[in-house]
Amino acid sequence: MDCLYRDPAAPVEARIKDLLSRMSLKEKIGQMTQIERRVSTAEVIRDYSIGSILSAGGSGPRDNAVASEWADMIDGFQRAALESRLGIPIIYGIDAVHGNNSIYGATIYPHNIGLGATRDAELVERIGAATALEVRASAIPYTFAPCVAVLKDPRWGRSYESYSEHTDIVRKMTSIITGLQGKPPTGLPNGYPFVAGRNNVIACAKHFVGDGGTEKGINEGDTVASYEDLEKIHMAPYLDCISRGVCTVMASYSSWNGRRMHADHFLLTEVLKNKLGFKGFVISDWEGLDRLSNPRGSNYRYCISVAVNAGIDMIMVPFNYEKFTDDLLALVDSGEVSLARIDDAVERILRVKFMAGLFEHPFSDRSLLHFVGCKLHREIAREAVRKSLVLLKNGKNGTKAFLPLDRSAKKILVAGSHADDLGYQCGGWTSTWHGSSGRITIGTTILDAIKEAVGADTEVVYEQYPTPETLNGKFSYAIVAVGEGPFAESLGDNSELTIPFNGNEVISSVSEKMSTLVILIAGRPLVIEPKILEKVDALIAAWLPGTEGNGITDIVFGDHDFSGRLPVSWFKNIDQLPMNAESNSYDPLFPLGFGLTYGGEE
């Protein structure tokens, strides 16, 4: 074989060395460049030797595109890459953060905060493996997941992307990486990236580091902490990710003691790469380099210099690839960025591409398409919903338990903004970046699930906002589902954390007239007023459960018992934030780890 790098039997490091020796500087910079699919023409991919393409949230072949349409698009991009001089395949990346959530009809699992409530690492690993199959079915080999942030303030708009406020729980949930990438073989050097095969994907531990610890929970804010606390609280999950062979790490938009993470050589290179031994590649976040100057995007050459020298290997440009290429070429020519730094970055990127088998299998595997939204995966998601539910109250004033509900009741009222809204149930990062309302994909709402679960003679009446006339009717009981609307990132920063959509008014008006179960759909704890908590008969924290609403009715009608425990402390009021479960002044409404069962245990 003329080209050693094309020989699948050759050692990976030898293949990297051979390919690197054949590359021009422009081709190397191309490998460091990740562009958005909307600017990805065949000509651009070939001429710039583009290394990676991504879809931003909601950016696909068309609205509601199915997996086969995604595969057609991405295979087209891949053909263009293989037509370049050296034929280096692209890595296509997407935010598959709770299932392959951008693809219509995919299975949508509970967001991470709900998975943290399960405490079930084996379940989370199975979710990772199932997600990998659905991602691969779409011709995508790379997901920007998991987020291993440790949540220190629920005012943060990315709270639901964190598994817990407790470092040990987050560390346990890194089992999802083994599900996504496969289990590394014994003897694989620590820190070396690993992908088991064509049914697995490249994972990305994010956002390095301290993104969940910013002051007042401000997204992209500043985490003020000693290095010892940063290491003990926020960095610890990355040790587990690295030991599991995670292929990539994404830098955080946030800062540490005023130092921007995208420009922090100490943390990215001295700690992550040198001390922790990470051998995969570090990727920037979306336009992460632009944020290093004010106004954003000004003095772009300086931004590239400080970020690449700090240790960023692949840059999520995502649109301005021409200026990025020209500026980085000039920086190398002037000596401001060394060729050795460029070679190190490209070596890391090629290592992941070789380990993922992209040179041997660059195109989609259409035999995987039947896995998308399949019954088995939806059963896993339904199990995850069941195990994520946390029972906060069951019965009034020490009276007998209200749950489980009687499925043979004569007449049931179902109400609230979230009872029949699949988009609200799934939350952000579903179909689009910020999520939306309505039947945005294939799934089962809470109302759908109730109708399926009750007896043939039971009448189910649904009114989102019940009228006085309805409330004066005769009902066996009511189920009210309220909560937050969908959001992502800074759009979700919230200094009040009250229940929106007149949630309290709906709960109050219904519970004054009949026995009421309240299901709270939210990516974090919200303020529960004492008078509201007193009025309701039962209260469940259901987080953002995804497409499988039947997991809720499996529990509330008694087919399964509750096992979920709070992954975060539930505050009484905003003035208590941020809370610290180890503080002497800790006085939550419900403590970290709280959760009732039908037996009444906490």
Image: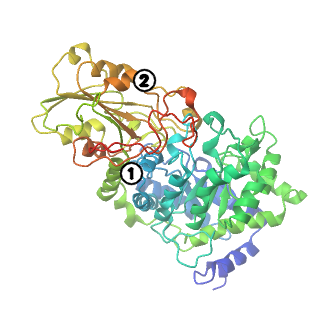
Residue 214 in the image, given as x and y percentages of width and height: 65, 39
Confirm whether residue 90 shows in the render.
Answer: no
Q: Which quadrant would residue 440 be assigned to in this image?
A: top left
Q: Is residue 289 left or right of residue 486?
A: right
Q: 64 or 118: which is nearer to us? A: 118
Choose between 395 and 536: the one closer to the eye. Answer: 395
Residue found farthest to the right: 334
- Tag 1's secondary structure? loop
Q: Position of residue 243 (x, y in %)?
A: 58, 67
The label shown at residue 106 is 1
Residue 134 is left or right of residue 462, and the answer is right
Q: Which mark is on residue 529?
A: 2
Q: Residue furthest left?
A: 457
Q: Identify the mark at residue 262; answer none if there is no mark.
A: none
Q: Amino acid at mark 1?
A: Ala
Three-letter amino acid code of the residue under disc 2: Glu
Q: Residues within 10 Å of mark 2 (few under 14, many from 20)?
A: few
**Dot 1 and dot 2 residues touching (CB under 8 Å):** no
| Farthest residue, direction front | 584
The residue nearer to you, when weighing 365 against 409, is 409
Q: Residue at x 75, y 66 (%)?
A: 344
Quadrant of the frame with the N terminus: bottom right
Image spot of residue 63 (x, y percent): 44, 42
Most extreme residue toward the bottom is: 1
Mark 1 vs mark 2: which is more N-terminal?
A: 1
Judged by depth in the image, the label closer to the viewer, 1 or 2, is 2
Residue 336's place in the image compared with 386, above or below, is below
The local secondary structure at tag 2 comes to loop
